Amino acid sequence: MSVESGEGGAKAALVEGEVKLPEGWTWTTVGEVLVRSDSGKSFKCEPRPASSNEWGIVKVSAMTWGEFRAAENKALLDSSLVNPDYEIRTGDILVSRANTVDHVGAPVLVEDVRPRLLLSDKSLRLTPGEAINRHWFVHWLRSPVVRKAISAKASGTSDSMRNISQTDLRAIVIPLPPAAEQHRIADALDARLARLDEIDQLVTRARIHAAALRKQILLDAIPEPDDWPEGWRAETIDQAGVVSLGRARHPDWHTGPKMRPYLRVANVFEDRIDTTSLMEMDFSEGLDKYRLLPGDILLNEGQSPHLVGRPAMYKGIPEGVAFTNSLLRFRAGADTLPGWALLVFRRHLHAGRFMREVRITTNIAHLSASRLKAVEFPVPSFDEQRRLVSGIKRRLARADALERLLDNAETYTTALRRTLLTEAFAGRLVPQDPHDEPAEDLLKRIRAERETAEAERKETRRAAAQARRKKKQGTAERLTTTPPPAPVSHTPHPEGEQATLPLEFTE
């Protein structure tokens, strides 16, 4: 057995409950099925992608989404630093060593890669033995069991980024089937997961159509100012209500006697306020000015350009919250319903109206209170405001229902993908064949292959070191050896001539 000590503990760490492997399978570790594993190198590079005639450094995003994306790279600054040992080739299995919490350790099989692409220090290359089916191995690395193991071992101080060491990755326990069964499992998973991928693509396209439908509903709800119906009063946002900017955050208010929760831009989405992650500051002064009331509309003051001005209505939950200066608040006047104001703002968002008022600093678009106040705002009668809001709500509810169906489909495919991988690596996806070569024999061949490869690497390193020593010795000899004297010519002179000798003069 490759997992010699603590096998029961290893299996318990792998899956919950007692695990019984099929006949011919065996327990081992990731490191035991590898001939070698390599960490990348840190290169100085530019943020732009490499052109076709340049060397590029692979980014972790190239291996994050389940397929190798060669275009996700950075251009190498100095091609003289290229080391061919780090070049990525077809058939390589790459793992993102440093990535987000959800994607650290994400593996890909390089099916096709343009030349001149190098492994970065945030990546690992795994080279399994020749008898290991690489498709099977990558499916295993994506399985729920391995994802759970990587999550438990990944380290990092950031809330979003994690690192997995090569040592921890190699130590992950793996149930190894015979080589022939690996091929059967890989073929079955490839076929089934391909169908799930097709469903995911359909869901993605349907989401695009649903978003377009919602946008069109909002654009149709309120026409352009030149086409406003007779009886609609043309005002500005400042005339229709009161616009105010939230309270700035300051270190002095991180603690204090009157700590209160507040909303920031991360809490405000279109027509939705997320209160799962609220922060607090001391409001010993100024709480009345910044306290939110039910019906207040909050708009993103600073965001990416296409999301700036994203609005949502505060409905009183949770109570007593305030807001920061990353948000703008609109409190409707006497002639304006809050629901109508929200509809107008959502229409302005999708029509790109707010984008025309933004100012961009360090890639963040800002919508100032003064610019927001000057934006046009239509005011129909109260009855028409109620009728339009009610009608648009019904139409948007259909789009929301479509989104829920798509959410359910996505949840179903995600669960089915997890189940397929779990069943495959428990030996329940394809039948076993008693004539298959046992996995124990497979491990012996991999061990011999690894020893041979290591011996070849040692010999290569020894030869390279010897060549460097000879080169260095030759250089030293050339620098220390005294050059020989100029040769004396013994060529006879013509009759009657004498050789000219150098003369020395002394005083």
Image (cartoon, rainbow, N blue to C red):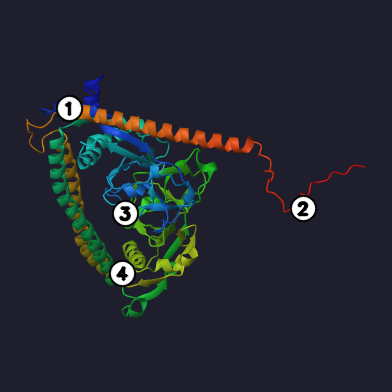
Q: Check if mark 3's residue and mark 1's residue have beta carbons within 8 Å.
A: no
Please, what secondary structure does the residue beneath circle 2 have? loop
- The front one of 398 and 287 is 398
Q: Which mark is residue 272?
A: 3
Q: From what the image shows, is residue 465 above or below residue 260?
A: above
Q: Is residue 273 visible?
A: yes
Q: Which mark is residue 382?
A: 4
**Quadrant position of residue 148:** top left
Say which of marks 1 and 2 sits in front: 2
Dot 4, crowdedness within 10 Å: few (<14), some or many (≥20)?
few
In the picture as drawn, the residue positioned furthest to the top comes out as 5
Q: Which residue is at a point 24% across and 20% down the rendered structure image?
A: 4
| Vertical relation: 448 (above or below) 308 | above
Ranked by sequence position, the earlier of labels 4 and 2 is 4
Circles 2 and 3: CB atoms closer than 8 Å: no
- Of marks 3 and 4, the one in the foreground: 3
Q: Nearer the viewer, residue 478 or 182?
A: 478
Q: CA distance from mark 3 to mark 1?
A: 59 Å
- Decide which of 76, 231 is in the foreground and name it: 76
Residue at label 1?
A: 441
Could you say which quadrant of the image residue 7 lies in?
top left
Earlier-in-chain disc, 3 versus 4:
3
Residue type at numbered disc 3:
Arg
